[in-house]
Amino acid sequence: MAAEHEYAVIGHSRSRIGFILALIAGSIAGLAAEIARRVLVSLATAGDASTPQLILWPVTGAAVFGVVFLLFDRIAWRVYGVAPLIGVPNIGGEWSVQGKSFDTAGQPKSDWQACMIITQHYEKIHIHLKTTQSASQSITAAIIPEGNAGYRLIYSYRNDVKPGEGDMQSHIGHCSLLFCKNLDEASGDYFTSGGRQSIGTMELKKDS
């Protein structure tokens, strides 16, 4: 499986979120250091000779920021109410896909079904689509807010065909999907190049 990769969210400033997380990490580090200082002072005042001079590891701002960012990236950003507040929609999960393909003249070729798995964190994303004949992995991606219409996901991908699938060839493709505001349905289209010339449409429904 291809690695997760960075993705853009138009209109969203990750640097601003990083600044806020840095402030939170600095506050936590400062509080921890003050608690440690008071504990050591209390022990020294009590004259507890059995207590080691160093009972706590230093808590640096960098270490705390690493933990805070990891928790935010993996869990906190998608907690109810947070994702809409920061402007990053949570489209992660498994989706059932109904697709239709057409040739370059716009004539119908075939209907197909697939499973799409979107692995999404705050910083990175990976889009994996699997059919009975092939599987694709995302290469680049961007999310664009479109007001009351919802959110548009635009991504490029590499499709690898299973052996024995006739004249089908591995290829590069591009896809545009509009997710409704409830983030439980999406629809869009795609086109391919580099080994296979086709266009098509897709309808997605999120699996429960």
Image (cartoon, rainbow, N blue to C red):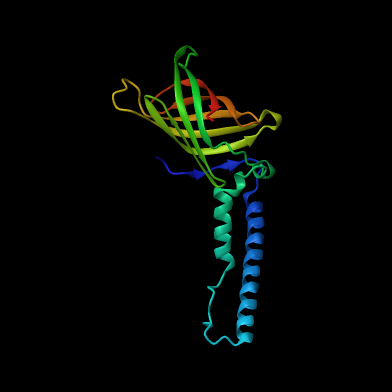
The relative height of residue 101 versus residue 116 in the rendered view (above or below) is above
Q: Where is residue 55 in the image (x, y as percent from the top left)?
A: 53, 77
Q: Which residue is drawn at 55% across and 47% down?
A: 123
Quarter where residue 19 is shown: bottom right
Quarter where residue 65 is shown: bottom right
Q: Depth check: 61 or 71 in front? A: 71
The single residue placed furthest to the right in the displayed view is 148
The relative height of residue 67 versus residue 144 in the rendered view (above or below) is below
Q: Which residue is drawn at 54% across and 54% down?
A: 70
Q: Depth check: 176 or 35 in front? A: 35
Q: Depth check: 183 or 169 in front? A: 183
Q: Position of residue 5 (x, y in %)?
A: 49, 44
Q: Residue at x 50, y 26 (%)?
A: 96
Q: In this view, does 128 lie to the left or right of 72?
A: left
Q: Quadrant of the N terminus?
A: top left
Q: Position of residue 131 (x, y in %)?
A: 41, 26
The relative height of residue 183 versus residue 87 in the rendered view (above or below) is above
Q: In this view, does 195 lie to the left or right of 11?
A: left
Q: Is residue 102 left or right of residue 163?
A: right
